[in-house]
Image (cartoon, rainbow, N blue to C red):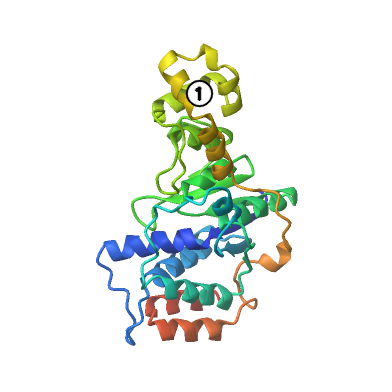
């Protein structure tokens, strides 16, 4: 069995844990009044991952601001609600947790964490390492192949599903390679990706099953039933814009040292630093778990 590198999608996991816990009534406040729901949830997932999955390597990526997609399409993600006021400072705390465990963080100006994760996956698999991406974002499913799996949360934080190529096909009716083409037609309301107006899930899947990709669909437009032919023709520009917006970049140059990503274990992180941080955050249950790693 090959060694495994777990890549954590920092912002996506922070959002997911924040809304999962606050939505369930979790107070998420330290004795000093600091909001901690997202930090607690993120740290819970991290510790569970280390304990249950025993990864050989770990790394994290965070978003760092505007990207080339915003320049390409100023309305990109414009419909999203702004980050909750009590979540913003928790991102910094999460970064402190990651730093305390001596887990490398990778970011790239002008690109999203998705692009960094995609590029890290490409680099790592060339080194014969199996990659598992831990995220709350289905967009990462386009990266799935025999050497890359994606872990998405289920109904609870502890209920995660690991997607292989066959799992993606079974769940969504398209292959990982077709995921971007699918999104190019159906769009994405959360990212404000337009897609093709009037083409929905069933039609997009049927077209991809028949023509394999967006380019072939447009090359065979005259063979498609008239009502969808008209919609596709009228929205061709939006379709190919959507494909550019949805496609994850996988060829970024990153300073990646696999050895530096060794998962937290005895001797390779400062346990006193972690314990002090957990005391500051009143994470008493986590204190017991981290002692087992030392």
x%, y% of residue 247?
A: 58, 43
x%, y% of residue 293?
A: 54, 74
Residue 5 shown left or right of residue 90 in the figure: right
Query: For the point 61% across and 46% down, which residue is it?
Result: 148
x%, y% of residue 288?
A: 43, 78
- Given residues 59 and 248, the one toward you in this image is 248
Query: For the point 70% across and 54% down, which residue is it?
Result: 252
- Given residues 292 and 30, the one toward you in this image is 30
> Looking at the figure, which quarter contains the C terminus?
bottom right
- Given residues 107 and 109, the one toward you in this image is 109
Above-or-below relation of 32 to 144 = below
Above-or-below relation of 13 to 142 = below
Place residue 196 in its image quadrant: top left
Secondary element type, mark 1: helix
**Residue at mark 1:** 233
Q: Residue extending furthest left? A: 25
Residue 185 shown left or right of residue 5 in the figure: left
Mark 1 is surrounded, within 10 Å at the Cα level, by few (under 14), some (14 to 19) or many (20 or more) other residues, namely: few
Query: For the point 36% across and 81% down, which residue is it?
Result: 34
Above-or-below relation of 34 to 258 = below
x%, y% of residue 145?
A: 61, 40
Is residue 235 shown to the viewer in this render? Answer: yes
Number of numbered callouts drawn:
1
Query: For the point 62% across and 59% down, which residue is it?
Result: 110
Is residue 292 shown to the viewer in this render? Answer: no
- Given residues 75 and 205, the one toward you in this image is 75
């Amino acid at each position: 069995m090959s060694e495994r590198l777990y890549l954590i999608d920092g912002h996506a996991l922070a959002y997911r844990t924040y809304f999962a816990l606050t939505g369930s009534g979790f107070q998420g406040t330290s004795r000093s009044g600091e909001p901690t729901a997202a930090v607690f949830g993120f740290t819970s997932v991290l510790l569970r991952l280390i304990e249950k999955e025993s990864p050989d390597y770990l790394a994290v990526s965070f978003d760092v601001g505007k990207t080339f997609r915003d320049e390409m399409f100023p309305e990109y993600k414009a419909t999203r609600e702004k980050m909750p006021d009590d979540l913003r400072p928790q991102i910094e705390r999460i970064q402190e947790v990651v730093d305390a465990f001596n887990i490398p963080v990778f970011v790239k100006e002008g690109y999203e964490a998705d692009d960094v994760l995609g590029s890290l996956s490409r680099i790592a698999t060339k080194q014969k390492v199996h990659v598992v991406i831990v995220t709350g974002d289905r967009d990462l499913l386009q990266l799935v192949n025999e050497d890359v799996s994606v872990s998405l949360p289920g109904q609870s934080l502890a209920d995660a599903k690991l997607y292989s190529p066959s799992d993606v096909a079974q769940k969504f009716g398209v292959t990982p390679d077709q995921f971007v083409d699918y999104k190019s037609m159906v769009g994405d309301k959360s990212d404000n990706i337009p897609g093709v107006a009037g083409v929905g899930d069933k039609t997009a899947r049927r077209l991809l099953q028949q023509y394999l990709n967006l380019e072939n669909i447009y090359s065979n437009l005259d063979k498609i039933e008239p009502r969808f032919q008209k919609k596709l023709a009228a929205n061709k520009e939006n379709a190919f814009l959507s494909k550019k917006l949805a496609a994850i970049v996988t060829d970024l140059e990153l300073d990646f040292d696999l050895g530096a990503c060794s998962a937290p274990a005895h001797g390779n992180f400062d346990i006193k630093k972690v314990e002090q941080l957990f005391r500051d955050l009143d994470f008493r249950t986590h204190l017991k778990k981290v002692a087992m790693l030392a």
